[in-house]
Amino acid sequence: MSEDLKKTASNGHVKMLIPEEQQGKINEVKKLIGPLSGKALVYCSDASISRYLRARSWNVKKAAKMLKQTLKWRAEYKPEEIRWEDVAEEAETGKIYRSNYTDKHGRTVLVMRPARQNSKTTKGQIKYLVYYMENAILNLSPEQEQMVWLVDFQGFNMSHISIKVTRETAHVLQEHYPERLGLAILYNPPKIFEPFFTMVKPILDTRL
């Protein structure tokens, strides 16, 4: 694996603040977000706001804007309401699944097998990914907020991937699931993957 791939497979550097400073910024974001009710309260917990702040290097205005966009997206897309029957066709080949084991830190492991791609529709692929992101988050232990991705490239070739889907995937993950990826393991990526990675690297954030 190239050095670029290794670097992107793990979290980037995050500015650290003392607990009092963190709480102060969390409270500032809450003021900018304003009164909330219903499901929005669940997604604006201190822990959730902290993830958005870390994703925006503790910039309060940027974090608040990002969180507002996520609340709007969740209200419209309703990811928590996606059911198995909505993604069953996408799931036929087992291209993504939540493993029945965790890593040594107790983090949920999502296994991804891009060579088993069976769909050309961006909408369907994104819905399937969101379904499993929501599922993985629900299955995190109380002390964990991040997951692990194990990407198995067995049998992969360039016909299994598209720039359009990659771009939309990056957008959804970076904007609406910040700081959820603790570690990405790229297993046996072929040489042909590296030119593609170099091409899409500018649209990827090293901290998801």
Image: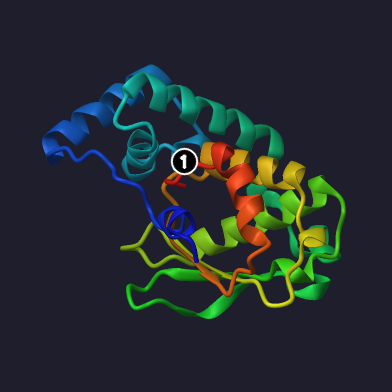
The vertical placement of 163 against 35, above or below, is below
What is the number of callouts on the image?
1
Name the residue rendered at 82%, 60% in the picture. 159
Residue 51 drawn at (x, y percent): 37, 42
Q: Label 1 is placed on what type of residue?
A: Tyr
Residue 155 drawn at (x, y percent): 74, 76
Residue 94 drawn at (x, y percent): 74, 74
Q: Can residue 98 be seen in this view?
A: yes
Name the residue rendered at 34%, 34% in the picture. 53
Q: Mark 1 points at which residue?
A: 43
Colour style of the rendered protein structure: rainbow
In this rendering, position of residue 38 left or right of residue 125: left
Task: Tell me where residue 54 sits by quadrant.
Answer: top left
The secondary structure type at the circle numbered 1 is loop
Considering every residue shown, the one lying at the far bottom of the view is: 100
Name the residue rendered at 68%, 62% in the picture. 192
Nearer to the camera, 144 or 42: 144
